[in-house]
Image (spheres, rainbow, N blue to C red):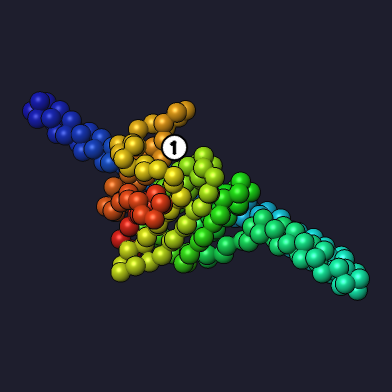
Amino acid sequence: MKFLLGFKKRKQYDIQYDELDKKYIEAIAKNMELESEYQLLMEEYHHEKDQGAEIEKLHENARRLKHDMKNHLLVIASYLNSNEYDEVKNYLSKILDKLNQMYTYIETGNSVLNYIINTKLEYANQNGISVKAEIENIPFQRMGSIDFSSLLCNLLDNAIEASLLITNKQIHVSILRKRGYDTILIKNRITKSVLKKNPEFESSKPTKDSHGYGIKQIRSIVEKYDGMLEFYEEDSMFCVYVMIVSQ
């Protein structure tokens, strides 16, 4: 009889233990979920803060340009009154060169995308890289903001780093929704084939081709979301094309 009572009591303990263990696992999972949400919120907060600083800097540049324009117009008027037309052409040429060096802020409606695009492309512009951009307001909802940031940063960093090594520095950025896919296409000018020289994208530093940097991270993130990744070359441009199914 004592053995039977002991067995029942042990069984009750086992049931209680299983219930407590289940609650403990649920609590850990909930804590990890809250921690992840907190990290995402903090990341978005820092993006918004940095974005605000960038916008304010651009506004300050615009105000300075407006003030300078008044002085420029006075100088041009003085040359015209003196019939010094060659001087007018030279002066206007200098103004246009200065305007071309100024970066124009890109607004996409996506705070993470805004921050990455404007930070990276402004850096490219400051380093003499010609940039063409076609960007839609795409939320990339299937991707976590950390994965999206890592993917886009690596793609842009590769293109910028490769462009710094050549004379004709050009980057094309296209972020569009096509046929149910969120797509990212990054192109950069090359002087010789990357795919022929380094098809496996081996580590590029310090002597090998710079496209190898970050390729593993790019592949890993694209695979995580069952996306498609393509590398190709056309018109002396190295191209990386990413397709992620839209949510």
Which one is nearer the viewer's eye here, 203 or 79? Answer: 79
Residue at 15% from the left image edge and 28% from the top image edge: 6
Residue situated furthest top in the rendering: 3
Residue at 10% from the left image edge and 25% from the top image edge: 3
The secondary element bearing badge 1 is classed as helix
Asked whether, in this view, residue 238 is left or right of residue 97, the answer is: left
Which one is nearer the viewer's eye here, 87 or 190? Answer: 87
Position above or below: 180 against 35? below
Is residue 148 shown to the viewer in this render?
no
Snapshot quadrant of residue 74 = bottom right
Residue at 48% from the left image edge and 64% from the top image edge: 135
State the image coordinates of residue 222 (x, y, percent, origin top left): 32, 49
Q: Quadrant of the N terminus?
A: top left
Residue at 60% from the left image edge and 49% from the top image edge: 128
The amino acid pointed to by label 1 is: Ser
State the image coordinates of residue 233 (x, y, percent, origin top left): 35, 51
Mark 1, Cα crowd under 10 Å, few <14 / some 14-19 / many 20+, is many
Q: Quadrant of the C terminus?
A: bottom left
State the image coordinates of residue 25 (x, y, percent, origin top left): 31, 40
Which one is nearer the viewer's eye here, 218 or 144? Answer: 218
Snapshot quadrant of residue 29 = top left
Position above or below: 156 against 105? above
Asked whether, in this view, residue 224 is left or right of residue 137, the answer is: left
- How many numbered marks are there? 1
State the image coordinates of residue 43 (x, y, percent, origin top left): 53, 48
Q: Which residue is mark 1?
A: 210
Is residue 218 shown to the viewer in this render?
yes
